[in-house]
Amino acid sequence: MAQSTECLDVFILGGQSNMAGRGGVDVLENGTRAWNQVVPMSANVSDGSILRLTAQLNWEPAKEPLHRDIDAGKVCGVGPGLVFGAKVLNHLRETGHANPTIGLVPCAIGGTSIRDWEKGGPLYNTMLHRANFARRGGGTLRALLWYQGESDADSKEDADSYKWRLEKFFSDFRSDLNDDSLPIMQVKICGTWPFVEEVRAAQATVKVPGVCTVDSWGFDLNPDHMHLTTESQEKLGLIMAQKYLSHCHA
C-alpha cells in the first residue's frame, strides 16, 4: 500500500514478547498456541488514521496483531501499541489537530535479552533502519516504546549488568537517530523471574534524561505466568499513552 508519511507521528515499538503481544494467545489441548482474535474496543480504529509499518517497509492500516510479520515464528496477539496509538490519536483530534495520523513501527522480538539489542547487532540495526525509513517524507519520530528485561531476569549475571547495558542502548539509539531528546517510554517488568527485582531496580534508576517509566507490576498474566492478558495490555497501553501525553507531548 503506497502511503504518504507527511505529518505522520511515528512511534517505535521495541523490546521482547510483551511488547510484541501475547494477549489472548492460548495454549490449545494439542499443545499448540493460537490467538483468540479478541481485540480491545479501545484498539478498534478502522478509518486508516493509524498505520503499521510492515516487515517489507510498507505502510498499511494498523490492526492486531501488530507484530504478526515481525516476531517471526511466534504466535502474536494483543500488545500495548495499538491501544497507545488510538489514545494518542483521540487526544490529537480533541485538541484541534487537523487529520492526525499515527505511524506504529513494530520491532519487538520475543525472548531477546538486552545483549541482543546492542549497537551494531542485527536487531539494533533493523530497528534503526525501520525508524529512519518511517520518518522519510515528513514523518516525525515521537517516542520509543520499550518493554524488555524478562530474559535478563533469569540470570544474576545478566541482571547485574542490565542497568549499564540499558543506558548504553538508549543513548546509542538516540545518538544514531541524531535525536538526543527522543522520548522513551519504558515499562518495568513483572512476573516471577528469579532476578526480577534486580532488573526492576535497574529500570527504576536508569540515568538517561527523558525516559518515562510505567510499571506493569500486579497486572494480570496469561496462564503461562509470563505474558500480559489482553485486558492488561489494554490497561498498559492506556497508561503509557497518558504518561506520554502528560510528560512528553508538546
Image (cartoon, rainbow, N blue to C red):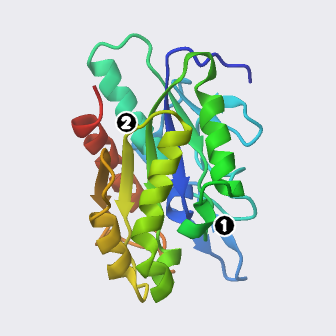
Q: Callout 2: helix, strand or loop?
A: loop
Which residue is more in the foreground, 84 or 110?
A: 110
Q: Is 147 positioned to the left or the right of 46 in the image?
A: left
Q: Quadrant of the C terminus?
A: top left
Q: Is 191 positioned to the left or the right of 201 in the image?
A: right
Q: Residue at x 59, y 60 (%)?
A: 118
Cα separation between marks 1 and 2: 39 Å
Q: Quadrant of the N terminus?
A: top right
Q: In the rendering, which numbered label is found on residue 181?
A: 2
Q: Residue at x 39, y 46 (%)?
A: 184
Mark 1: which amino acid?
Answer: Ala
Q: Residue at x 33, y 48 (%)?
A: 240
Q: In the rendering, which numbered label is found on residue 48?
A: none
Which residue in the protein does label 1 denote? 34
Kindly indicate the quadrant of the structure image that contains residue 166: bottom left
| Label 2, residues with CA under 10 Å away: few <14, some 14-19, many ≥20 | some
Kindly indicate the quadrant of the structure image that contains residue 63: top right
Mark 2: which amino acid?
Answer: Ser
What percent of the width, then of the height, locates residue 84?
40, 42
Q: Callout 1: helix, strand or loop?
A: strand
Considering only order in the chain, which callout, 2 or 1, is on the residue closer to the N terminus? Answer: 1
Query: Would you say residue 131 is visible in this rendering?
Result: yes
Kindly indicate the quadrant of the structure image that contains residue 105: top right
Query: Would you say residue 229 is visible in this rendering?
Result: no
Q: Is residue 48 above or below residue 177?
A: above
